[in-house]
Structure formats: structure tokens, C-alpha cells
């Protein structure tokens, strides 16, 4: 698997746009200091994570709704992943209620069989197969321990757009999971790009008041990416950091959060004893290696896949660089972050509940929302541009 640096944007791109993170960008700020939450559709011509590769086992079917589409996945005899719409062309019975027959998927109602291109290859009750006996198929690729799916026309799938993920980087000890969130996926993107909520939601693990007590914050925007960098110099470490790093004094702490369209969010976080010049050693693409600065470093990977407008498949993995080969340390760090994430999921579900009760209710934005506003603006514009192209076609 590729080194994490390969997944970062190349810096021969057009100059980045920088924003003062003490206030929201001017063109996103309404005269009433509110912005209306608009229901999003989905960006179709993009790669989403459909599953961890380990979720697909030989001879088994996996049903999953992605961007509103019911999809069924399986592996053929060579191990190649196939994905088609979860709906038989005959009487619309879910194919996921059928079985795998060699390389094909067999409908559990009348026995129709399909290959990975969606073509019907067998109708048990007759020899002739109608030319239109087929279902939609999706481009899928297994890479970086995950299964990616292209939700647009399979013929237009752009392999160059598959994001590089560092889940096998030996510098880190990794552990991942998938969770089902009853909330819109944009809520998660906003949450990850504004970590000031850690102070209040995660005070028992990864949060404290250093996050809001005069940190150094910078928000940057590229064509399809946004990065928020936050430094908390000479600050008290939060509980999880004390437990993982055995800190006894002040630390210099960092959070480098990078969102990439449509819904990949990488977080480099960590801390080193104050005075180690951690900030001066930061790499252009993200955070320094905490372990090499006498401190700790974490890599948090978030792969956010919308199921519907109100539900989300949340894939995530946590890496630690203190003792990458120590599974007990990896499990401890994962457990601490999982505890925090569980608190976030409750927040998302409560937000979604209130949104459903008052559709279109205006929200007030503040400076800490700058990164989330930029990301959602990019995403919404891409969705609108895609819709315009479809109409023109």
C-alpha cells in the first residue's frame, strides 16, 4: 500500500486560497448572520468506500445502499469484486436474497443468473434470454484494504481519482471499523473540520480548553480540497494524550485536518513536549511524526459514504506511531477514539432529528465553521455542475 504522502495533494497546483479563520468567508456570510441548511443530493461521478475488503468473503452476498442506490456485492471465483443493482430485472426481487453460483449471482425468486457486468446469463425456465435482460452494474475496485465504488456510469469511472489511503503504512499501528449513522453525511464533514467541539463533547478523552484558548488556526482551500491546521502551543495535554504519551508537563499540540471531495477526511494529530520545535518541523502535507519528536502522533482516516439523505455509512481507521507493532497500544488508542466517535454519532442523530422537525431552518455560522463551509460549498458546486451536465446530455 502506498505511503500516506502519496495521497496528499501535489503542490504544483494553482496557489492555494487562505482564509482568516477568525471569521467565516465573506461570500458565505449572510447579512442576517445565518445560512440555510439545504438538502443535498449526491455527487455521482466519484469514488466512495462501499466496504472494508474483509467484509466480502467467498460465496457471500453483501447488500448495501449507497447514495440512495440499492447495491449487492460479491466475489467471483478469482476473488474479483462485482457490484450490480440489488434488483432482479424480472420481478424486481432483491438479488441480495439469492446466492453466489461460481462467478455469477443467482436470484432467489426464479433463478435468473447475472455476471458482474449486469448481463443475465441464465434463465432456468427457458433457453432464450431477452436482450434487455440485464441490471445496472457499477465499477468497483479493491485497493488499500477497502472496496471503492463509482456511483456514476461505470464507463466513465476514473481510476486516477481513487484516493490513496495509508492503512498499511508500517509507521502506524492501524485498526478500523464501520458504523451506521442516522444523520446526513455533510454533518460529519462539518464536524471533522471544526474540532473546537472536542472541548465540550469529548472532555473525558481527546478534548480540553486548549482547543479554544487562543490556538493558531489556518484554513486553506484548493480546487477540490480544504485543510484546517490548528496549533496549541505550550498547552495542557488532554486525558487520552496523557495516557498514550506519559506527558507530565506542557505540550505543543497539533491538528491537521484535510478534506478531499467528496467525503474523505484525514486527520494528523498529536503532541510533543513544549520546546521540541514541533511546529517548525511540520511537513507541507500534514503533521510531523510525533514519535520522532519525543511525543505522540495519530493518523485518523474517515471515509464517509452517504446511504440516503438521512443516513450514512461511516468507515474509519485509527493509526498510532508510538509503538506501531504493539497491538495493545493500537487497541487502547482505537478504544479512546471510538469512545469519542460514539459521542459524535449521538450528536449527528440529534442534529438530524431537529433538522427533520424544522426543514430549512436557518443556522448561524461563526469563525470555526470556515473549513466546513468551504468544503460544503465545493461539494454543492460540484453537484450542481454535474446536474447541469446531465441535463445538457
Image: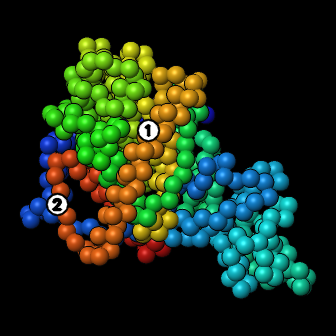
Q: Which sits in the foreground, 287 or 294?
A: 294
Mark 1 surroundings within 10 Å by alpha-carbon count, few (fewer than 14), some (14 through 19), many (20 or more): some
Secondary structure, mark 2, is strand
Front residue (pair 101, 18): 101
Report, in whole angstroms, how far the alpha carbon at label 2 lies from the one at label 1: 31 Å
* Position of 118 relative to 249 (above/below): below
| x and y, in percent, of residue 11 in the image | 37, 33
The residue at which mark 1 appears reads as 336
The extreme left residue here reads 31
Q: Quadrant of residue 247?
A: top left
Q: Quadrant of the N terminus?
A: top right
Query: Horizontal and vertical percent for residue 318?
Result: 49, 38
**Residue at 78 percent of width and 54 percent of height:** 58
Question: Residue 346: in sight, yes or no?
Answer: yes
Residue 74 is left or right of residue 180, and the answer is right
Q: Which residue is mark 2?
A: 364
| Residue at x 48%, y 49% (from the top left corner) | 303
Pick whichever of labels 2 and 1 is earlier in the sequence.
Answer: 1
Amino acid at each position: 500500500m502506498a505511503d500516506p504522502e502519496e495521497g496528499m495533494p501535489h503542490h504544483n497546483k494553482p496557489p492555494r486560497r487562505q482564509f482568516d479563520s477568525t471569521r467565516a468567508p465573506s461570500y458565505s456570510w449572510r447579512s442576517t448572520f445565518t445560512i440555510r441548511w439545504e438538502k443535498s443530493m449526491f455527487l455521482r461521478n466519484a469514488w466512495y468506500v462501499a466496504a472494508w475488503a474483509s467484509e466480502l468473503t467467498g460465496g457471500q452476498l453483501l447488500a448495501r445502499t449507497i447514495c440512495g442506490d440499492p447495491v449487492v456485492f460479491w466475489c467471483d471465483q478469482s476473488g474479483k469484486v462485482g457490484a450490480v443493482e440489488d434488483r432482479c430485472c424480472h420481478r424486481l426481487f432483491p438479488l441480495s436474497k439469492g446466492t453466489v453460483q461460481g462467478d455469477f449471482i443467482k436470484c432467489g425468486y426464479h433463478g435468473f443468473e447475472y455476471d458482474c457486468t449486469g448481463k443475465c446469463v441464465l434463465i432456468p425456465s427457458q433457453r432464450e434470454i431477452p436482450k434487455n435482460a440485464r441490471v445496472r452494474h457499477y465499477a468497483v475496485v479493491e485497493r488499500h484494504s477497502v472496496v471503492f465504488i463509482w456511483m456514476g456510469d461505470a464507463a466513465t469511472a476514473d481510476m486516477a481519482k481513487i484516493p490513496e489511503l495509508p492503512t498499511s503504512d508500517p509507521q502506524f499501528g492501524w485498526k478500523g471499523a464501520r458504523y451506521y449513522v442516522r444523520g446526513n453525511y455533510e454533518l460529519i464533514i462539518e464536524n471533522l473540520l471544526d474540532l473546537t467541539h472536542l472541548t465540550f463533547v469529548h472532555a473525558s478523552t481527546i478534548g480540553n480548553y486548549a482547543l479554544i484558548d487562543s490556538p493558531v488556526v489556518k484554513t486553506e482551500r484548493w480546487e477540490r480540497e480544504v485543510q484546517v491546521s490548528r496549533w496549541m502551543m505550550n498547552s495542557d495535554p488532554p486525558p487520552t494524550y496523557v495516557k498514550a504519551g506519559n506527558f507530565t508537563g506542557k505540550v505543543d499540540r497539533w491538528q491537521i485536518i484535510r478534506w478531499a471531495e467528496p467525503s474523505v477526511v484525514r486527520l494528523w494529530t498529536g503532541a510533543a513536549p513544549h520546546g521540541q520545535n514541533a511546529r517548525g518541523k511540520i511537513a507541507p502535507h500534514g503533521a510531523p511524526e510525533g514519535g520522532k519528536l519525543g511525543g505522540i502522533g495519530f493518523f485518523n482516516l474517515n471515509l464517509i459514504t452517504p446511504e440516503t439523505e438521512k443516513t450514512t455509512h461511516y468507515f474509519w481507521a485509527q493509526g498510532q506511531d508510538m509503538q506501531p507493532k504493539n497491538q495493545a497500544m493500537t487497541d487502547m488508542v482505537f478504544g479512546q477514539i471510538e469512545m469519542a466517535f460514539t459521542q459524535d454519532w449521538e450528536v449527528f442523530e440529534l442534529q438530524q432529528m431537529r433538522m427533520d422537525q424544522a426543514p430549512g431552518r436557518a443556522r448561524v455560522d461563526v469563525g470555526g465553521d470556515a473549513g466546513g463551509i468551504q468544503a460544503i460549498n465545493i461539494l454543492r458546486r460540484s453537484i450542481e455542475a454535474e446536474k447541469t451536465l446531465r441535463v445538457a446530455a
